[in-house]
Image (tube, helix red, strand yellow):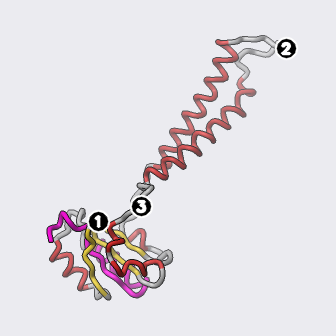
Amino acid sequence: MATSFIHGLMAEFNTADEVLNAAQRASQNGYTEMDAYSPFPVEGLSEAVGFHKTRLPLIVLIAGLCGAVGGYFLQYYAAVIGYPLNIGGRPLHSWPSFIPITFELTVLCAGVTAAVAMIILNGLPMPYHPVFNVPAFERATRDKFFLCIEAADPKFDRAATENFLKSLHPVEISVVEK
């Protein structure tokens, strides 16, 4: 079977310690494109498989700043340029009265952008993933632990990767087809 037709190789383990050890050893051996699946959170597993930093905080910050600038400018334009009214001798550019709307638009833009960007950056919706082609994977939510080294990894060689996974003493090694 050619590498272009497989998603990767998946090893099945019985305990959380085994999959954590396997992920750490895979990372030490230079594998970078891998993922681990477990029925409950395993401390240190996300770091072992190469936890990826996200751009979400920067995107939310930029959206919040755009909301603040946009909200402030909208009020400034309306009060000073578009429809200036001198009421009670107050200045046209009365910035303290602009703060509540500016804050609300900051929160609105940041919150909506956070929700939409999180969905997009997580690749959702994803109704199908190749790991579901492995029959034993249905136990990933109950009592089994899995480590999948993806074919997209620069170091991936089917025979060498399979030999490496065998050295970890898994219960079973499966080919994950696309």
| Image marks 3 and 2: residues in contact by CB distance under 8 Å | no
In front of the other: 51 or 123: 123
At label 2, which amino acid type do we have? Gly
Residue matched to label 3: 127
Comes first in the chain, label 3 or label 1: 1
In front of the other: 148 or 27: 148
Q: Can the viewer see residue 86?
A: yes
At label 1, which amino acid type do we have? Thr
Instruction: Tell me, for residue 32, which label it has, or none.
Output: 1
Q: Is residue 147 one of those drawn in magenta? A: no
Label 3 sits on a secondary structure element that is: loop
Residue 108, image quadrant? top right
| Image marks 3 and 1: residues in contact by CB distance under 8 Å | no
Q: Is residue 92 left or right of residue 174?
A: right
Q: Residue furthest right?
A: 88
Instruction: Tell me, for residue 53, which label it has, or none.
Output: none
Taking the spot 58% from the left edge, 28% from the top edge, the residue there is: 70
Instruction: Tell me, for residue 88, which label it has, or none.
Output: 2
| Image marks 2 and 1: residues in contact by CB distance under 8 Å | no
Q: How many marks?
A: 3
Where in the figure is residue 42, as x and y percent of width and height?
47, 76
At label 3, which amino acid type do we have? Pro
Residue 69, image quadrant? top right
Q: Disc 3 versus disc 1: distance between alpha carbons?
A: 25 Å
Where in the figure is residue 147, as x and y percent of width and height?
34, 76
| Residue span colored magenta | 1-27
Label 2 sits on a secondary structure element that is: loop
Q: Nearer the viewer, mark 3 or mark 1?
A: 3
Q: Is residue 9 one of those drawn in magenta? A: yes
Taking the spot 34% from the left edge, 79% from the top edge, the residue there is: 135
Where in the figure is residue 101, as x and y percent of width and height?
69, 32
